[in-house]
Amino acid sequence: MSESIVIALITAGFPVIATAITAYFQYRINARNAAKQSILQMIAEDQLAVLYREMPTNYQNILHEYDIYAKNGGNSYVKKKVDEYIAWFDKTEKEMSRGKR
């Protein structure tokens, strides 16, 4: 009797565990992809705003999304883009505050 219970628990348990693991990894992939798209979109929005002589406004949001991206296994491509954005933002902010733009 106890063998059949163990077999039934194993038979039912493996699919549940596999589904939970798959769902977790899919969540991480989705969170990473959403953060990546948000980061790239906000960078483009800020660069466009500067063309219209407006201050970029997405700095904190980009850093927040980058934290999510990195936490979920992000790669160096987006890190490079964010680092370039930070350097661009600092330069642009200084220029705009001096009235160069």
Image (spheres, rainbow, N blue to C red):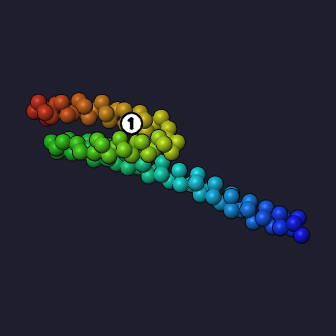
Of the 4 image quadrants, the one containing the N terminus is bottom right
Residue 9 drawn above or below residue 42: below
Residue 15 falls in which quadrant of the image? bottom right
- According to the image, label 1 marks what residue? 81
**In the depicted structure, whether residue 85 falls above or below residue 57:** above
Question: Is the C terminus in the top left, top right, bottom left or bottom right quadrant?
Answer: top left
Q: Quadrant of residue 5?
A: bottom right
Report the residue at 59% width, 57% height from top: 23
Q: Is residue 13 visible?
A: yes
Which residue shows up at 15% across the image and 34% down it? 96
Q: Tell me how many marks there are.
A: 1
Q: Is residue 25 left or right of residue 39?
A: right
Q: Nearer the viewer, residue 76 or 52?
A: 76
Query: Is residue 17 rendered to the left or right of residue 3?
Result: left
Task: Give residue 34's position: percent from left, percent from top.
Answer: 44, 52
Left-right relation of 99 to 60: left
